[in-house]
Amino acid sequence: MPRPARGGRPRHVGGTSIRHVPMPEPVLPVRPEPHQHDGPPLAGMEEVGTGLLDHVDAMQRVAASAPPGPLLINAGPGTGKTHILTRRIAYLVAELHVPASQCLVLARTTEAADALRRELDGLLGPVADDMTVRAFDAAGELPPLGHLFVDDLEHMPIRLYETLRADRGDQPAFTATGDPDAHIADGEPGPFERFAQDYPEARVVRLSRNHRSTAPILAAAMQLITPVSRAPGRGMLPARPAAGTAPVGRHFALDDRDERHFAGQLAERLRPFGVAPDEVAILAPEGYTGIDTARPITSAAGREHRVVCCVGVTAEAFPDEPGFRRLLFAAMSRARDLLYVSHIGNGSPLLDDIDPGLFTPFGHVRGHRSQPEQPRLL
């Protein structure tokens, strides 16, 4: 295929025009650092009790202050579900006098369990040392503690879930957080779906205020996942102001080499704008090769990055199937300030379900040759 001229003048191949468009200057929104999920105090709640819930939003307060019993926090990405789980644990211990020694806290990974432990230490001090905090794969012989808290329930092995349920009966003090759309695989109902079936009287609280992503990133991700969402009717509202935010960058790569060059240079391209290299994540589908810094999308669960670049977003890697929608949604929803998607050719058909106005196309942008307008009969 002939290469288009670099000066921006299009070259025509059949009915397609290819124009080289430079990468736009990044627009990084101003935001307080470090990143916080907390908001301003709720009116009238300042200095009430321990103050643990002073800065949470209304639905987060409902979740954190619910009485003991089965509780499912159904929360999309960036809504602060892990953050509010620690607030709930601290609230029950400090306000309702639940013994810390009776709290069992389980998280997806050792890293996640360590982060929960640190936050609980910060909220409760030495009292938190009496809690049992473990990763799913390190649960081992679980002590018969009265209050169970699970983060990212959708990722819990089904055997572990069944063991916990068998130990605790039908109405346990069991709080779980999760996002059903974060579970990529299809098949038999997982622990998240089982929870609703096994505890029909459980309280369910939905968190829909996203504290992570800019409005364009959130809108693009929601348009992608809505047709296959396991949380019908879910709405996601950006907590961050829409002003001063950038559209999603869509890089049209000429070939593998062009895509590797773009992704390999992205961190250096963003450095002058105050983005550190470790704040940029290159995420790729399984089997993608050629970029040393690229990580599988499946490894990104539970993380967030200031900048995310999804590479290899082609029709072959991301066909229009529910599992691949969830995979791309998982990658896109990791981004805080900037999101890029990159592909060779026309890209995945999944991108066609996103409003073109949410994208800024650049690279070797393809388009159809305009045809002379035909007169319309009135």
Image (cartoon, rainbow, N blue to C red):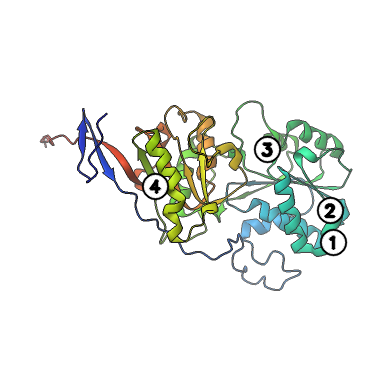
The type of residue carrying mark 2 is Met
Tag 1 secondary structure: helix
Residue 306 x, y percent position in the rendering: 52, 54
Q: Give the side of residue 278 with respect to residue 361, left or right.
A: right
Q: In this orientation, which residue lies closer to the viewer: 232 or 289? A: 289
Q: Are marks 4 and 1 in contact (CB under 8 Å)?
A: no
Question: Looking at the rendered structure, which numbered label has been put on residue 191?
Answer: none
Report the residue at 69% width, 64% height from top. Answer: 53
Dot 1 corresponds to which residue?
127
The type of residue carrying mark 3 is His
- Picture quadrant where residue 14 is located: top left
Residue 338 x, y percent position in the rendering: 46, 52
Mark 3 surroundings within 10 Å by alpha-carbon count, few (fewer than 14), some (14 through 19), many (20 or more): many
Q: Give the side of residue 180 with respect to residue 223, left or right.
A: right
Sequence-first tag of 4 and 3: 3
The type of residue carrying mark 1 is Val
Is residue 152 depicted above or below 245 in this figure? Answer: above
Alpha carbons under labels 3 and 1: distance apart? 28 Å
Dot 2 corresponds to which residue?
131
Sequence-first tag of 3 and 2: 2
Report the residue at 77% width, 60% height from top. Answer: 121
Is residue 274 depicted above or below 314 in this figure? Answer: below
Residue 327 x, y percent position in the rendering: 54, 36
Tag 3 secondary structure: helix
Question: Looking at the rendered structure, which numbered label has been put on residue 249?
Answer: 4
Dot 3 corresponds to which residue?
155
